[in-house]
Image: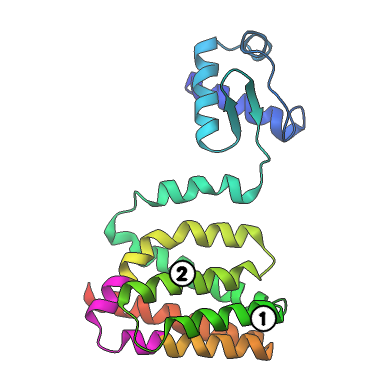
Amino acid sequence: MAVTDEAIEKIKGMIVSGALRPGDRLPKESELAADLGLSRNSLREAVRALALMRILDVRQGDGTYVTSLDPQLLLEALSFVVDFHRDDTVLEFLAVRRILEPAATAMASTRITEDGLAELDGQLDALGSDPSVEQLVASDLEFHRGIVQHSGNSVLLSLLDGLSGPTTRARIWRGLTQEDAVSRTLHEHRAILAALRDGDAEAARSWATVHIASVEMWLRSTL
């Protein structure tokens, strides 16, 4: 194991064991390096890596702290990594979205409030019947994020946020090249909203699956 990897594992072990808790300040560098049997250089590299992963927060002049370890914060690193995806992996990202988002939509159907439904309805009304492709895709992201927020699961929300980047370009390209993409998307959004309003989890799940699968099927046909 590389020295830096060993240092990361040792700090991780302190956090997992509870020796360091969310919000705790790490001991001084010289003390921690000695306690863990590490060189100060390898400890610094480990701290930098864990800071990039949002596990540690390095505050200039104040020391290094364990972050809140909130799932939403930790999963921010996912979107960073996902941005480096290759174009030939977009279908794989869509497949993951097809697994997660219908489940989140079904969960939201039993939890969403009247205010939440009104907000989604307002988004669709504001979009109108003839939006540009860019407006439609921006609204699509906002619409689905609003639904997932009502799933009650912050991990699902963070995962789907992280996966949105690679699939956005596919949705834009579909909107520009497929004749009925805009009208179909508007229809599917209304169907999803109707299922949410009825509290029908299975209908919400089904329409969300249809909505994502239509993008996936189009993309497969272009490859």
| Residue 29 placement, left or right of 98 | right
Q: Which residue is mark 1?
A: 109
Colouring style: rainbow
Residue 92 lies within the magenta run: no
Of the two numbered discs 2 and 1 on the same chain, state the one appearing first in sequence: 1
Please tell me which residue lies in front, 158 or 121: 121
Determine the image quadrant of residue 128. bottom left
The secondary element bearing badge 2 is classed as helix
Residue drawn at the location 49% of the way across and 83% of the way down = 124
What residue is at 44 percent from the left and 77 percent from the top?
212
- Give the image location of residue 118, x and y in percent: 63, 82
> Eyeballing the image, is 36 above or below 188?
above
Q: Position of residue 200 (x, y in %)?
A: 66, 89
Residue, x 47% and y 81% (percent of image)? Answer: 126
Image spot of residue 203 (x, y percent): 59, 89
Please give the name of the residue rendered at 46% of the width and 87% of the height, measured from the top-left corner. Answer: 188
Does 184 sit left or right of 109 as displayed?
left
Q: Does the image show residue 154?
A: yes
Q: In the rendered structure, which segment of residues is drawn in magenta?
A: 172-185
Eyeballing the image, is 125 above or below 150? Answer: below
Relative to 216, 151 lies left or right: right
> With respect to residue 12, does 128 lie above or below?
below
Mark 1, residues whose alpha carbon is within 10 Å: few (<14), some, or many (≥20)?
Answer: many
Q: Secondary structure at mark 1?
A: helix
Instruction: Tell me the amino acid under the disc marked 1.
Output: Ser
Task: Measure the alpha-carbon separation of dots 2 and 1.
Answer: 18 Å
Residue under label 2, please give it.
141
Q: Name the magenta segment's main secondary structure.
A: helix
